[in-house]
Image: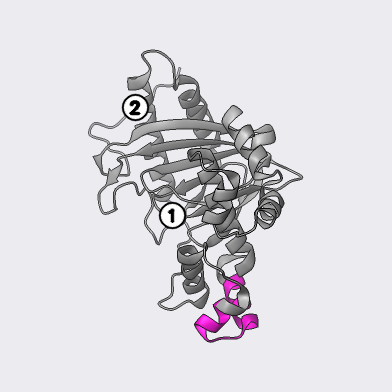
């Protein structure tokens, strides 16, 4: 028998000024994980995603990441993120959503600094993360399990904090970056009548140069990003409102329903009406 003892007064790596409050646990697999969740954000919560199996591409805060089995992804409040699985591999992932977390030195609902990398490899902690996420998922909704879920969530936050202590590469955020400026411009005006020529004219550069700088910074073309930004917002409206499909399309910048349906299906794989029905049923 091998005994292990915790040192008296041992604290976690993060100084918590206000604990997190669990909102939900999700487990994405099968047909639902095959439907990409395009560009969206949450103003009032943080999410931790753990990739149990598979590979994908994630855009978080304007940077593209190739993600793999065992990766832990952090979505701070207000940070745009885009999720898609590699079709030939797919993804099985857990997602934990919570609010109210306040760590010393960070804004409320932030788990990683703006300069820190939001994608962390769990490495030798893979089994621990998978087991904890599964336990949380199983406990949510059980009678009398609220306190158990609360303590499991605090443990999860501290485990992520241990990963953040590793010497991970930090994001290179230069003082002036045309690609990121264009990304912010699209984020603010995605519902307007935008095209590559109009954006290039706004920034007084050729559309070839703009596309090159955007791709180098964000990892995709400006138009690809614009479409996914619109579709991501449309997904949120379809899930969370009773607006008609036509009204949703107009809200995100598509004046003609046929254009909206075509763009949505190209990104998500199904028309917007089908997506709403599948999501709400599933």
Using the rendered image of the protein, determine whether residue 38 is visible from the camera's viewpoint.
no
| Residue 1 placement: quadrant | top left
Q: Secondary structure at mark 1?
A: loop
Residue 181 locus on image (x, y percent): 47, 73
Q: Secondary structure at mark 2?
A: helix
Against 192, is 106 above or below? above
Residue 122 locus on image (x, y percent): 52, 43
Residue 70 locus on image (x, y percent): 58, 41
Residue, x 56% and y 66% (percent of image)? 218
Q: Nearer the viewer, mark 2 or mark 1?
A: 1
| Range drawn in magenta | 199-216
Q: With 149 as the anchor, is 222 left or right in this view? A: right
Residue 126 locus on image (x, y percent): 55, 37
In the picture of the structure, the residue carrying the numbered disc 1 is: 79
In the picture of the structure, the residue carrying the numbered disc 2 is: 150
Q: CA distance from mark 2 to mark 1?
A: 24 Å
């Amino acid at each position: 028998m091998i005994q292990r003892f915790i040192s008296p007064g041992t604290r976690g790596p993060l100084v918590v000024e206000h604990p997190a409050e669990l909102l939900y646990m999700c487990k994405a697999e099968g047909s639902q994980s095959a439907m990409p969740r395009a560009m969206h954000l949450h103003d009032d919560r943080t999410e931790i995603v753990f990739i149990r199996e598979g590979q994908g591409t994630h855009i978080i805060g304007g940077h593209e990441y190739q993600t793999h089995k065992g990766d832990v992804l952090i979505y701070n409040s207000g940070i745009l993120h885009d999720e898609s699985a590699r079709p030939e591999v797919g993804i099985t992932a857990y997602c934990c959503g919570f609010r109210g977390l306040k760590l010393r030195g960070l804004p409320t609902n932030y788990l990683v600094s703006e300069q820190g990398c939001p994608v962390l490899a769990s490495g030798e902690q893979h089994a621990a993360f998978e087991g904890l996420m599964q336990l949380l998922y199983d406990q949510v909704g059980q009678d009398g399990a609220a306190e158990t879920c609360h303590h499991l969530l605090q443990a999860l936050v501290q485990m992520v904090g241990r990963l953040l202590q590793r010497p991970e590469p930090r994001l290179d955020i230069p003082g002036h970056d045309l690609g990121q400026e264009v990304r912010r411009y699209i984020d603010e005006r995605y519902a307007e009548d935008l095209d590559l020529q109009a954006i290039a004219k706004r920034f007084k550069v050729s559309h070839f140069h703009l596309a090159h700088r955007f791709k180098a910074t964000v990892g995709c073309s400006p138009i690809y990003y614009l479409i996914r930004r619109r579709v991501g917002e449309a997904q949120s409206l379809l899930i969370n409102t009773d607006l008609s499909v036509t009204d949703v399309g107009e809200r995100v910048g598509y004046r003609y329903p046929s254009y909206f349906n075509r763009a949505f299906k190209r990104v998500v794989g199904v028309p917007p009406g089908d997506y709403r029905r599948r999501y709400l049923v599933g």
